[in-house]
Amino acid sequence: MKRKKHLGELEQMVLMAVLQLKRDAYGTSVLSELRNRAGRKISPGALFGTMDRLEAKGFVTSRLGDPTPGRGGKRKRYLTVTRQGVAALREARTAWARMSEGLEQVLRP
């Protein structure tokens, strides 16, 4: 039996950030998106580890952009969410919604 690949909270947020950023999803832009939308400030190391895990799971693909002088000749690593990544995110959101059912009164401010 094939084991399901589940998403952690940060993995879900990174996938959502990449989807929001469309073709402009690379390390710094994803960090900014997480900070601006979710109020999460994470280290670049934590982000790149998460990106590597998502790619190993088949939930994102990456490609290297052209070297830029402003980055000392380094290339940006751009991310794209795969169909499997969208499906995993959809499953995670559905599970979250099911687990939240009936808790409205408890969670209400």
Image (cartoon, rainbow, N blue to C red):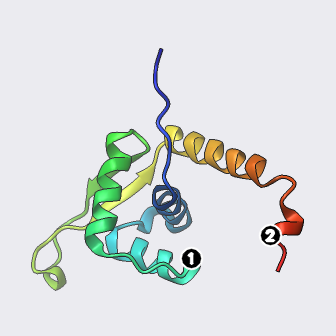
- Residue type, mark 2 in image: Leu
Give the residue number, with chain letter if any, for mark 1.
38
Point out the image quarter for the C terminus. bottom right
Residue at (62% x, 47% y) in the render: 92
Please tell me whether residue 33 is drawn above or below residue 82 in the rendered image.
below
- Residue type, mark 1 in image: Ala
User: Helix, strand or loop at disc 2?
Assistant: helix
Dots 1, 2 in contact, CB < 8 A: no
Indicate which label's residue lies in the foreground, 1 or 2: 2
Q: Within the image, what quadrant is residue 56 found in?
A: top left
Q: Nearer the viewer, residue 43 or 59?
A: 43
Residue at (48% x, 14% y) in the render: 1
Residue at (87% x, 54% y) in the render: 102
Give the residue number, with chain letter if any, for mark 2.
107
Mark 1–mark 2 Cα distance, whole angstroms, equals 18 Å
Please tell me whether residue 21 is drawn above or below residue 54 in the rendered image.
below
x then y, percent, for residue 57 = 38, 39
Q: Residue furthest left?
A: 72
With 42 as the anchor, is 3 left or right in this view?
A: right
Q: Residue furthest front?
A: 106
Which of the two discs, 1 and 2, labels the residue nearer the N terminus?
Answer: 1
x then y, percent, for residue 25 = 41, 66
Q: Nearer the viewer, residue 14 or 105?
A: 105
With 65 as the anchor, is 24 left or right in this view?
A: right
With 66 as the anchor, is 98 left or right in this view?
A: right
Please tell me whether residue 38 is drawn above or below residue 77 in the rendered image.
below
